[in-house]
Amino acid sequence: MALLQRRVIGLVQRMLASSGGGCGAPSREEEHAVAPVTANGGGGGAALREAKLKRGTVSVEEDAGRSPAAGATPLLFTAIFVSVALNVALAHLLHRYAPSHPAASPDQQRDTCVQPGTSRGGEHGAAAPVGELKYRSASAPSTGKPAVTPDSVINLDHGDPTMFEAFWRETGDAAEIVIPGWQTMSYFSDVSNVCWFLEPGFDQQVRRLHRTVGNAAVDGYHVLVGTGSTQLFMAALYALSPPNAGEPMSVVSTAPYYSSYPAVTDFLRSGLFRWGGDANSFEGESYIELVCSPNNPDGAIREAALSSDAGKAVHDLAYYWPQYTPITRRADHDIMLFTVSKSTGHAGTRIGWALVKDREVARRMTKFVELNTIGVSKDSQLRAAKVLKAVSDGYDVDNEEDDEYSSSGARRHRLFDFGRRKMVERWSMLRAAAAASGIFSLPEETTGHCNFGDETAANNPAFAWLRCDREDVEDCAGFLRGHKILTRCGSQFGADRRYVRVSMLDRDDAFDFFVRRLASLK
């Protein structure tokens, strides 16, 4: 700042020296004319006036009656001129230093704000040097992965459900929510509930949606909320493992199994449970079997492979929704896990829920979440409740002939219809691309009667279990990586490396580039 001040003063002095009469700096004759004025006060008055002059506070009244020499500029106008000159000089220097930061595009200007009052350390509101202006995101949220181009690496490793963005953009304010600053401040939601941090509105909408779809029983079940279904999966392992067992409980699943099951199970090296591998090769009586249906990665409909009085089962039904598979029955297992990530596409909300029959198991699962995160974000629960409500509202029956519209005449927004159309279209495109390439194969398409839509529907999984049949390719993920396509290797699912899992849920542009690129591989 000192450097800036010196530059401003120097610039003003140069401007004053180079200006002529009129509104410019005083001439030599004018400077001599001003001198007697400053001395006329006599004694202390002269010193006071000199101080006032230096501060630019000489008033019009004090100057009244004086007759400066011809051509002299009144001190008031001199002060005004100096003030204007300082502002002009400052603007000049700001313009001069601005190129040290890239110019913002209109979108960037809307999404960012200049924070000149933020110090390097961001404390005490100290002003930063002009050459170090801070740019910080204002209120615009992230949009996830960037748009792709023909030369982009297509990342279909993760099941990021951005396919649903197009649907939610069309729903207007149906799923929007405003949370007042005073709301959701307490740890507690309902102290009479086993899951004391569960928001009643979220509980209500979970039960309503399952009754609407018919994919899971809710009467007689406890609803538990978690930060995604992964936290509830860990809570179930904690709740089902005997606390005083001599050795950890074995956790198993039929291969190919979800790649995160082994990693999450063994991450903390718990003494309560440990990964036991493929359920089909497990020998023993005590176990926790993870049943994912429809299965991640291959979309198969699964039942428990093991049966034992000492064995327990956790059913992961994250994909048991009409956009992915026919709803053939109302599931009524002891523990069932769901998530908004794959049901509605709101992965970033980080909300999952469990339907649990046994109260003691529900209590122990709740205790795990309490110890792990002291509850679950109420803000996320409220948003998830509004989202689930919007989904159910789209399928409310109003006894109208044309049930595409609500009783108010507004067009219904039906998530599962949108999702099924998308998945049917994408699976058709993928099968055509695999056939055009001639070196890839996919599981056979299966169908069933969907009770939700009262129609025969195909199974269109959220992931494609793709196999590379070219003889010289033993690592399909590596082969596709060489062509800028990222997938997840089959070995992570307990299967052969010739297989890969491909997400079917990315945005349209990424998926379109993927199928065109896949079709070109020979």
Image (cartoon, grey):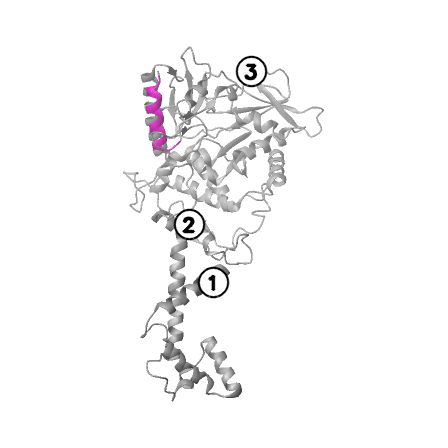
Asked if residue 453 shows in the view, the reply is no
Which residue is more in the foreground, 241 or 110?
110
Q: Are marks 2 and 3 in contact (CB under 8 Å)?
A: no
Q: Which residue is mark 1?
A: 6
Which residue is more in the foreground, 176 or 501?
501
Disc 2 versus disc 1: distance between alpha carbons?
A: 20 Å
Give the label on residue 100, or none: 2
Q: Residue at x 60, y 43 (%)?
A: 374
Q: Residue at x 46, y 14 (%)?
A: 474
Crowding near the residue tagged with mark 3, few <14, some 14–19, many ≥20 C-alpha atoms within 10 Å: few
Disc 2 versus disc 3: distance between alpha carbons?
A: 64 Å
Q: Which residue is mark 3?
A: 280
Q: Are marks 3 and 1 in contact (CB under 8 Å)?
A: no
Asked if residue 498 shows in the view, the reply is yes
Q: Which of pointers 2 and 3 lies earlier in the amino acid sequence?
A: 2
At label 2, the amino acid type is: Ser
Which residue is more in the foreground, 76 or 390?
76
Residue 47: image x %, image y %?
A: 51, 82
Q: Circle 2 sits in a helix, a strand or a loop, which is it?
A: helix
Q: Circle 1 sits in a helix, a strand or a loop, which is it?
A: helix
Q: Residue at x 38, y 25 (%)?
A: 460
Q: Is residue 165 above or below residue 324?
A: below
Crowding near the residue tagged with mark 1, few <14, some 14–19, many ≥20 C-alpha atoms within 10 Å: few
In the image, which residues are magenta?
Answer: 506-521
Residue 515: image x %, image y %?
A: 34, 24
At label 3, the amino acid type is: Asn
